[in-house]
Image: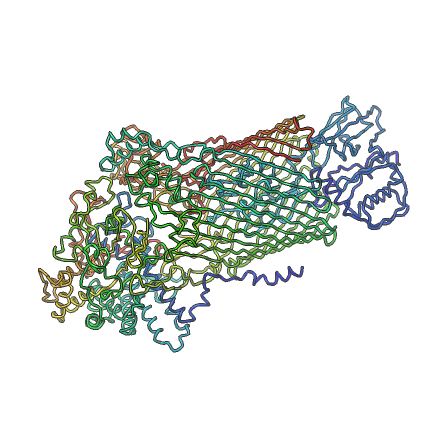
């Protein structure tokens, strides 16, 4: 009995157990190592996204692509292409929740960073803060471009806390302050060491400020960003990159991506090259859907694998208009687009010749940047040339996608520089543009473009160049949208609207696309999120 | 005075059963054999000290009765109980005392249990009643059904207290019997029998055992109780019923035997699991009952049915409440076989059988398949794939089902047991071996082999101490093919593979045929050959040790410590194969895994029982502690040096970069509980029980760590009442019961109450290039914690009655209403919190299960014939009344086919896990019909073409969308029923067991509509091909028809799944009766048995008993995505006892 009574006495200890494979929060955020892991977790949030990877959705919505997919698939991709309301309650929950998850992780680190025992190492602490704030701004920027006005969550909140939408001005002010902090607190050499590749640099922050300024000033038709970022400041940031960063253009355009390089007989420059300022770093290993660019499995040709073109799900068939927009002498054409007829791949691929070919909205063109590489005809096997030729067999092509997704590259910076300098320094603007075109035409530009002022006509030249240079990099759609200030969406209609004489307007098998002004180019907020927030935020118009 | 005394007992005649009632429940052993064992034990163990001077023998007997549990029976006309004696005994056994008392007289005594029968020197206690004018004398002998004489049987002249008891040879002699008298023969554990005397002077009587025994003892949790005194709803299944089905798994053995307990198989593969649901689904987290084997929490899988003595099922909340927080799904108490006193009894049971699939689906042959594919292509706007010439040349093609059958799959069982014991100890030991091959597999990949032993021993070394041990060890060796969800399901491949793929193709290196048609087609037999190279071995060692101390008379302390160790290992070999461009490997690899679960369980109970006059009180206080730990490690590595299954171990694999390891240890998962029970009964007439349990669990936060689970129940044995005495001619027993109780269910996940940091999916690759990128660990908060989470709670009210009437019938009816609320559910939280996944847990939801259960039994013995019929049927209605979210829906998974919508969900107002989809209104026969299907002037199905499905626009909004979806059925039945019949005549025996259910549906999808080239069943031949051809099956397409005929989930996928199954038929004959009468063998029974012989159902799939949920949701069942059917087995066996 005594034993039992003593047992009863210690029942509290008996029941008080702690997990072994996890850490209780009360024991964390104490050492610099903890802080590093908290920072890494924010980067970890860059992973994820499949059919709802924002750059992919933006390409589908732009004039570059159609929905594609298989004949038996649902029409979700067509609906994105057409700005239509998609079926289901939780459409776009991925972009929404991934964005806020990244913001949360940044807020967690920023709120706990003072609890860490840093000793004398204030530099590392400052760098972590700068990186965390950059990433928070990056997530906000991606979300606000996609959804428009959204709740601005600036700290760790409780489940019951609720936030209405903030104005665009508030959100962008916050973004700019974070980015400026990063640009000003990261030293020019911070994270430039190769081992640190992937971490944010001052240069990435400056480039992002350029992107933010151009989008905000365009779409919201404002001369500056909420009084915290002027045109001149932006121009200086971009010029600073071009002059001081050490980043440069690679000699061959196609060497930036694996399949484009191989298919045009160039050597793939690999990741972390001199042109890449910021990329999502994938690796040929890891677990299902984590650390891999799984979204890229969607874009390859459906049920077809012929080296170097690896199989995909046939999403985002490319508009022939884009192919035709390139000068045939432009090296970017064959680096960006796979034209089946031009490359003589196989006539069997044409659904008119092969009834079993399961590709919807076949155009004869597929996007080549980020396509999975195949090594043996008819085989899905993908090989990583980097690590002893390790093969991902069978269905490995679905998730062992290691090619980094380049968020910002130097050519984009040059073109931003050209655009920002249009009204101030045409010489600089022309020089920047020329560097991009010379690389594209291998220094034999048959029809050089000259910028002559800051008017719409000259800006259009830059937009055209950006379209050709940055196709399939998740940029085109926002470039179109930022031409639509003051609610005038003529640029969208001009670029995106498409008439297919062979199908009725509402037949999702056809190629008809009409931009819907009422959406303002924004995407649907997940209905479930609206209801979870007790409807204090409104659905975007048009949905 | 002496002359006037006509009764046998001091004062008046009291039936023996009344004496027995007041004995300790735990010592009430019913079978005669057991009784003698117990009596010797008691009489040996009981030592008395007293002194009596110059007292009558009667008063000495009285004194002994007071000091002990002994009762005396004697014929006072023979024994002079008024004789005065002086006696002094010190610490002596009853034998010695009786020798002293009776020593001088010519009397013998016999002890039956605690009952002492005193007879004259001839073993005769015959008496006469000399009060009648025209009285007569009757003599006779009373025996049991085996022909053994029964001493101590009371023989009474009905309506009087006059009677006698049988002597040690079962003989009696009674005189002074009036005309038209009726003799009533009664004995504990036997059915009372009335015999009219008439002209007879010699009446021999055979008493039969009380098979529908109200005097049976049942387990009630930490104690046993007489069934007739039980106030909750419980059921018991005994060993002899369990072994009839010759099941390897206990779940299968008890199917159909308990009203309200639904047991359905998740697969027919050897060793596959079962779904057990008692009285309807009470939670979205599943409704599994708590299973205790000799008090140790475990799995029914770890015990051989032959080793089980009884299974008690505590169904209502009041019965289960003593197990508190884990009893919301009911409790199953398994009691293993125990030894008994007597000579060693050896039993061997062995059988051999063959199993086959009892059904085959009619799939299209090659020629039919090619025509349908052509038609689908044309209907999908594509060119036909085959020419007429090709089609004509195809013939039957490959019949994959036929090729995948393991014909006459053998099943073998050997079981040997030894039982025996003496006054001091007893034992039961058994050894078993069972091997079963699956009916679907090649190369014996689906099989299970099991060997184990069970030991149970008990010691009664001291009067105040009783100890016992049970130990069960099981080793299982098995292999299986995938029979899970739509993705990992070999059976699905077999059913849908194209008949055009040749099974063998000599031109292929490995000889297996390949598809020349599509990269997505795989030869399913080749796939089975290459993919299912997996050895699973598991070892389960389970046991407990207990000691019971009697501190003072009636006060007992029992401590019971149990352990359960489960270790299983897997070893898998993946060879290099190339079955199709989309299905191949380029390296060999080996996987090894090990799981270990260890738990201990310590129960301490203090029980006091006392009878004050007619007030019987039992108090029990107890405490329980449990601790469970789980370890798991697994590794995978490629490139084997010796590339075969035998050598598929990690050390034999060379590719270091391919190595993947994972491992975890779950910390101690602990529970601490205290509980108590107070039982009261008055005169076996008014019964009441109150229990309370307080549970603490490490799975909850400090604020909500403890929960209280109370219950009250009461019973009234009306048949004991005077006002029902007039009904005794037909009503033997009637008890009405009512109970109310609460119990709980705990969360599956640990540490969800605590804010934790995780590194899972938080890291990132930094580094200059692909080769040099390094993974850095990241860490951030894992989830929104739920510190306030508490137990799911079930509250149940039960009313019912137990009855026996007309001597041979028994009927039990129960009505219940259970409300299960506060489910532990994950609810979406707004994503702006930053941790929307995993979703946090809250308590919420509510489901009501109401039902009624009937159990009717009939037993009759007519000379050598014995009949026994037992039937049960239960109705349950399940309705969700609350869901803790705005939508009032908990969504199920897409489990039916690739990209299918959810097929089952939980929603307010509907049964849990109901099937959700579109209603169809036939097939559009003509364009006109499509044009006529309009709402406000516009077409409801503008994309439809003739031959397409007409979906019902339920909400009349002019379009077909999710809002038109409705309930199409449910996986849980309305009625479950079972029936068992048995009969025996001399050495022959026969039994039949039936099982069935009514009112449930199955969603069937073997074929993914997006998988163009998947084969169809021949049903498709009745498809729509033109107006008037079919109003049910739409035209064939490649699944890309804009109308989405088959890619929308509709009632076309749903079928009624009522079935009645002949679960087993057994015919046996005891050779002993005929041939072996001289051999010292007690029984030598040979038997033939068939299981799953007939199934009556309208369901057209392979098997209507589908307990599978589709592989995702705990709240669903009845999803058939390619089911491994239950085999039909014929077996022959022998059972020898000597």
Q: Residue at x 18, y 68 (%)?
A: A417
Residue A445 position, x and y percent, is: 10, 61
Asked where in the image residue B434 lies, by quadrant, the reply is: top right
Residue B572 position, x and y percent, is: 43, 48
Residue A27 position, x and y percent, is: 46, 68
Which one is in front, B1080 or B105?
A: B1080
Which one is in front, B592 or B746?
A: B592
Q: Residue at x 73, y 38 (%)?
A: B17
User: Is B971 located above or below residue B1066 in the figure?
Assistant: below
Q: How many marks?
A: 0
Which one is in front, A542 or B606?
A: B606
In the rendered image, the quadrant that contains the N terminus of chain A is: bottom right
From the viewer's perspective, tell me whether residue B396 is left or right of residue B683: left
Residue at the far top in the pictured view: B199
Residue at the far bottom in the pictured view: A120
Asked where in the image residue B494 lies, by quadrant, the reply is: top left
Asked where in the image residue B78 lies, by quadrant, the reply is: top right
From the viewer's perspective, tell me whether residue B294 is left or right of residue B1039: right
Residue B21 position, x and y percent, is: 72, 42
User: Is A496 located above or below residue B417 in the figure?
Assistant: below
Which one is in front, B693 or B429?
A: B429
From the viewer's perspective, tell me whether residue B1115 is left or right of residue B227: left
Rendered image coloring scheme: rainbow
Q: Do we see residue B98 in this rendering?
A: yes
Q: Do we see residue B1032 in this rendering?
A: no
């Amino acid at each position: 009995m005594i034993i039992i009574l003593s047992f009863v006495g210690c029942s509290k200890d008996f029941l008080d157990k702690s997990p072994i494979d996890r850490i209780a929060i009360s024991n964390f955020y104490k050492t610099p190592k903890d802080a590093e892991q908290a920072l890494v977790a924010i980067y970890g949030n860059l992973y994820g996204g499949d059919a709802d990877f924002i750059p992919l959705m933006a390409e589908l919505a732009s004039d570059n692509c159609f929905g594609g997919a298989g004949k038996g698939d649902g029409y979700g991709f067509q609906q994105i292409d057409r700005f239509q309301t998609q079926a289901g309650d939780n459409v776009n929950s991925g972009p929404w929740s991934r964005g806020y998850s990244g913001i949360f992780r940044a807020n967690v680190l920023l709120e706990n960073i003072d609890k860490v025992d840093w000793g004398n190492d204030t530099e590392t602490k400052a760098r972590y803060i700068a990186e965390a704030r950059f990433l928070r701004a990056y997530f906000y920027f991606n979300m606000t471009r996609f959804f428009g006005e959204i709740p601005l969550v600036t700290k760790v909140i409780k489940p019951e806390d609720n936030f209405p939408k903030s104005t665009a001005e508030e959100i962008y002010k916050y973004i700019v302050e974070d980015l400026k902090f990063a640009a000003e607190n990261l030293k020019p050499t911070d994270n430039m060491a190769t081992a640190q590749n992937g971490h944010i640099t001052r240069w990435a922050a400056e480039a992002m400020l350029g992107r933010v300024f151009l989008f905000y000033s365009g779409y919201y038709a404002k001369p500056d960003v909420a009084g915290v970022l002027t045109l001149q400041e932006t121009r200086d940031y971009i010029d600073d990159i071009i002059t001081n960063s050490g980043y440069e253009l690679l000699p061959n355009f196609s060497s930036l991506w694996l399949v484009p390089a191989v298919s045009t007989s160039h050597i793939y420059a690999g990741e972390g090259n001199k042109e890449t300022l910021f990329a999502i770093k994938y690796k040929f290993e890891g677990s299902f859907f984590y650390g891999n660019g799984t979204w890229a499995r969607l874009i390859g040709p459906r049920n077809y694998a012929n080296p170097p073109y690896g199989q995909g799900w046939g999403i985002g068939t490319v508009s022939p208009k884009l192919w035709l927009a390139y000068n045939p002498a432009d090296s970017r054409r064959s680096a960006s687009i796979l034209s089946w007829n031009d490359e003589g791949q196989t006539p069997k691929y044409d659904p008119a010749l092969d009834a079993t070919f399961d590709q919807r909205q076949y155009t004869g063109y597929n996007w080549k940047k980020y396509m999975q590489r195949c090594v043996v005809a008819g085989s899905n096997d993908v090989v990583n040339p980097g690590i002893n030729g390790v093969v991902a067999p069978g269905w490995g092509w679905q998730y062992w996608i290691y090619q980094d997704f380049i968020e910002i590259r130097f050519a984009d910076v040059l073109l931003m520089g050209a655009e920002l300098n249009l009204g101030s320094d045409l010489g600089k603007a022309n020089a920047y543009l020329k560097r991009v075109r010379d690389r594209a035409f291998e220094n034999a530009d048959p029809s050089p473009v000259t910028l002559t002022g800051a008017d719409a006509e000259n800006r259009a030249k830059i937009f055209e160049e950006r379209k050709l240079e940055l196709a399939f990099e998740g940029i085109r759609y926002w470039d179109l949208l930022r031409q639509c200030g003051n609610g005038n969406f003529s640029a969208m209609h001009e670029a995106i609207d498409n008439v297919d004489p062979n199908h009725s307007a509402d037949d999702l098998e056809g190629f008809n696309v009409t931009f819907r002004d009422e959406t303002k180019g924004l995407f649907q907020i997940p209905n479930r999120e609206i209801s979870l927030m007790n409807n204090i935020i409104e659905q975007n118009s048009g949905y | 005075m002496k002359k006037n005394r006509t009764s046998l007992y001091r004062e008046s005649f009291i039936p023996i059963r009344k004496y027995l009632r007041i004995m300790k429940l735990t010592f009430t052993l019913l079978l005669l054999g057991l009784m003698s064992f117990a009596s010797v034990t008691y009489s040996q163990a009981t030592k008395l000290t007293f002194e009596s001077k110059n007292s009558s023998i009667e008063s000495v007997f009285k004194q002994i009765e007071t000091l002990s549990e002994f009762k005396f029976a004697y014929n006072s006309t023979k024994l002079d109980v008024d004789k005065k004696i002086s006696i002094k005994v010190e610490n002596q056994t009853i034998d010695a005392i009786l020798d002293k008392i009776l020593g001088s007289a010519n009397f013998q005594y016999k002890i039956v249990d605690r009952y002492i029968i005193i007879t004259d020197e001839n073993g005769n206690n015959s008496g006469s009643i000399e009060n009648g004018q025209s009285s007569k004398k009757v003599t006779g002998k009373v025996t049991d059904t085996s022909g053994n004489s029964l001493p101590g049987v009371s023989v009474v002249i009905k309506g009087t207290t006059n009677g006698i008891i049988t002597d040690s040879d079962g003989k009696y002699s009674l005189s002074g019997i009036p005309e038209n008298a009726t003799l009533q023969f009664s004995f504990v554990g036997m059915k009372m029998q009335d015999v009219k005397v008439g002209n007879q002077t010699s009446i021999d009587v055979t008493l039969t055992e009380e098979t529908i025994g109200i005097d049976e003892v049942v387990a009630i949790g930490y104690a046993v109780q007489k069934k007739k005194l039980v106030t909750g709803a419980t059921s018991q299944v005994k060993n002899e019923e369990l072994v009839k089905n010759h099941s390897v798994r206990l779940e299968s053995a008890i199917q159909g035997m308990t009203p309200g307990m639904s047991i359905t198989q998740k697969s027919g593969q050897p060793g596959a699991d079962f779904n057990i649901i008692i009285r309807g689904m009470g939670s979205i987290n599943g409704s599994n009952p708590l299973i205790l084997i000799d008090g140790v929490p475990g799995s029914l899988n770890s015990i051989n049915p032959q080793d089980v003595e009884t299974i008690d099922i505590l169904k209502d909340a009041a019965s289960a409440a003593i197990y508190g927080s884990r009893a919301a799904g009911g409790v199953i108490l398994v009691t293993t076989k125990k030894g008994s006193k007597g000579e060693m009894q050896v039993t061997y049971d062995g059988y051999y059988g063959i199993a086959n699939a009892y059904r085959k689906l009619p799939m299209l042959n090659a020629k039919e398949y090619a025509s349908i594919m052509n038609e689908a292509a044309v209907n999908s706007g594509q060119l036909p794939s085959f020419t007429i010439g090709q089609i004509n040349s195809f013939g039957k093609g490959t019949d994959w089902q036929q090729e995948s059958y393991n014909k006459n799959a053998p099943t073998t069982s050997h079981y040997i047991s030894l039982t025996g014991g003496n006054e001091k100890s007893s034992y039961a030991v058994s050894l078993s071996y069972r091997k079963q091959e699956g009916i679907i597999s090649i190369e014996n990949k689906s099989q299970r082999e099991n060997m184990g032993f069970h030991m149970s021993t008990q010691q009664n070394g001291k009067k105040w101490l009783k100890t016992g041990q049970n130990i069960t060890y099981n080793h299982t060796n098995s292999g299986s093919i995938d029979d899970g969800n739509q993705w990992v399901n070999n059976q699905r491949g077999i059913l849908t593979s194209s008949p055009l793929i040749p099974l063998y193709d000599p031109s292929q290196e490995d000889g297996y045929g390949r598809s020349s048609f599509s990269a997505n087609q795989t030869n399913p037999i080749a796939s089975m050959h290459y993919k299912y190279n997996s050895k699973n071995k598991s070892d389960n060692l389970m046991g407990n040790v207990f000691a019971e101390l009697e501190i003072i008379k009636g006060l007992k302390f029992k401590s019971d410590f149990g352990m359960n160790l489960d270790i299983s290992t897997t070893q898998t070999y993946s060879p290099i194969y190339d079955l199709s461009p989309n299905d191949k490997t380029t390296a060999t690899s080996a996987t090894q895994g090990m799981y270990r679960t260890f738990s201990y369980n310590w129960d301490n109970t203090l029980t006091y029982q006392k009878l004050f006059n007619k007030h019987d009180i039992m108090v029990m206080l107890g405490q329980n502690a449990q601790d469970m730990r789980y370890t798991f490690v697994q590794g995978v590595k490629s490139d084997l040096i010796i590339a075969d299954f035998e050598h598929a171990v990690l050390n034999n694999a060379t590719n270091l970069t391919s190595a993947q390891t994972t491992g975890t240890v779950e910390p101690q998962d602990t529970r601490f509980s205290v509980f108590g029970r107070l039982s009261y009964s008055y005169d076996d007439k008014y019964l009441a029980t109150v229990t309370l349990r307080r549970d603490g669990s490490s799975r909850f936060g400090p604020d909500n760590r403890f929960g209280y689970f109370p219950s009250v129940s009461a019973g009234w044995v009306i048949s004991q009442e005077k006002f029902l005495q007039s009904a005794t001619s037909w009503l033997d027993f009637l008890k009405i019961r009512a109970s109310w109780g609460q119990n709980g269910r705990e969360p599956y996940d640990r540490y969800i109450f605590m804010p934790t940091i995780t590194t899972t999916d938080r890291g990132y690759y930094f580094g200059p290039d692909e080769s040099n990128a390094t993974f850095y660990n990241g860490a951030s908060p894992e989830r929104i914690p739920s510190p306030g989470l508490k137990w799911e709670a079930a509250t149940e009210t039960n009313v019912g009655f137990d009855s026996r009437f007309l001597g041979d019938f028994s009927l039990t009816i129960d009505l219940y209403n259970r409300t299960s609320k506060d489910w532990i559910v994950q609810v979406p939280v707004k994503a702006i919190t930053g941790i929307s996944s995993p979703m946090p847990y809250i308590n919420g939801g509510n489901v009501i299960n109401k039902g009624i259960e009937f159990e009717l039994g009939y037993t009759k013995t007519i000379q050598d014939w014995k009949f026994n019929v037992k039937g049960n049927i239960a109705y349950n209605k399940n309705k969700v009344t609350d869901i803790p979210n705005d939508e009032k829906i908990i969504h199920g998974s897409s489990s039916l086919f690739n990209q299918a919508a959810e097929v089952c969900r939980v929603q307010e107002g509907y049964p849990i896990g109901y099937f959700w989809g579109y209603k169809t209104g036939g097939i559009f026969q003509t364009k006109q019909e499509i044009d006529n299907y309009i709402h406000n002037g516009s077409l409801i199905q503008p994309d439809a073409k003739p031959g397409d499905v007409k979906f019902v626009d339920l909400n009349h909004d002019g379009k077909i969308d999710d809002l038109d979806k409705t309930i199409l059925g449910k996986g849980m039945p309305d009625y479950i029923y079972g029936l068992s019949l048995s009969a025996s005549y001399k050495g022959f025996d026969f039994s039949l067991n039936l099982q069935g259910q009514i009112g449930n549906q199955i969603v069937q999808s073997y074929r993914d509509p997006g998988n163009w080239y998947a084969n169809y069943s021949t049903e498709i031949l009745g498809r729509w091909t033109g107006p008037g051809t079919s109003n049910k099956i739409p035209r064939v397409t490649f699944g890309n028809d804009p109308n989405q005929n088959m890619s929308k989930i509709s009632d076309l996928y749903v079928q009624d799944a009522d079935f009645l199954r002949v679960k087993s038929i057994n015919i046996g004959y005891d050779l002993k009766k005929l041939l072996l009468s001289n051999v010292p063998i007690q029984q030598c029974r040979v038997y033939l048995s068939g299981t799953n012989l007939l199934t009556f159902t309208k369901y057209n799939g392979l098997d209507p008993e589908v307990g599978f949920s589709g592989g995702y949701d705990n709240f669903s069942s009845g999803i058939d995505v390619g089911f491994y059917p239950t085999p039909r087995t014929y077996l022959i066996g022998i059972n020898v006892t000597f």
